[in-house]
Image (spheres, rainbow, N blue to C red):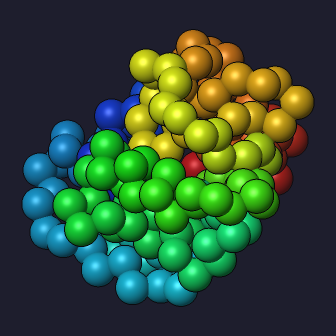
Amino acid sequence: MKEILLATKNPHKLLEFSQALKPFGYHCVSLEDIGFTDEIIEDGTTFFDNAYIKAKTIALKYNKITLADDSGLVVIALPEELGVKSKRFSKSATDSDNNTLLLKRLKDVSDRSAYFVSQIVIYYPDGKFYTYQGRVYGHIAEEIKGINGFGYDPLFEIEDLNRRMAELSREEKNMVSHRGNAIRKLVKDLKNEVITL
């Protein structure tokens, strides 16, 4: 199997990408696996910027094709507060405190519409890159529900499903999630041989 570097230490992301790419003969290796401990400064203003920074940094350091994902939550009523800063929304940056703060900030707000974004960048050591974006639309519920997933999943109710992201099994989530949607675009290009890794 061909090894692909994944610029993340997140085990959820590693599993999701591994399952998608394994049928094509690719084995995903995380930053944890290669012992990368440096901090990558994600100072971009868009999801693309940050995914590009991560993918390029790792690809050039290890001279290998690298895949990176940057994702987050966009809440229409709080246009400047989440997005690329979703992980660092609260002071502690923990999932629990982020969710608690989001509920507080949306108290008495009628428009609770929101969407998740996942931006994938595949960077080649020669400077070539490809990018894919996936989204899922919904709204922020008024209470936490569900035990699966991570981040804002217990608050995000998916459009047309009337279920929280955290109520879905991993397989169900992969079928509708922002990252799942971005990965499907990547997989389509692999199937059609538009790109090779």
Q: Residue at x 81, y 24 (%)?
A: 161
Q: In which quadrant of the rendered view does residue 129 lie?
A: bottom right
Q: Residue drawn 43% across and 19% down?
A: 147
Extreme-front residue of the structure:
108
Q: In the image, residue 159 lies at what x, y percent?
A: 83, 37
Seen at 20% across and 40% down, the residue is 33
Of residues 152 and 69, the one nearer the viewer is 152
Question: Is 165 left or right of 103, judged from the image as shown?
Answer: right
Give x and y (percent) for residue 88. Answer: 34, 67
Q: Nearer the viewer, residue 44 or 141?
A: 141
Q: How many marks?
A: 0
Residue toward you, 131 or 127: 131
- Which quarter of the rendering shows the N terminus? top left
In this rendering, is residue 88 above or below 33?
A: below
In the picture shown, does residue 75 fall above or below 85? above
**Residue 187 image point, x, y percent:** 73, 38
Occupied quadrant, residue 39 = bottom left
Residue 69 at least partly seen: no
Q: Name the residue rendered at 58%, 60% in the picture.
A: 106
Image location (x, y in percent) of residue 172: 67, 17
On the question of residue 191 being in view, the answer is yes
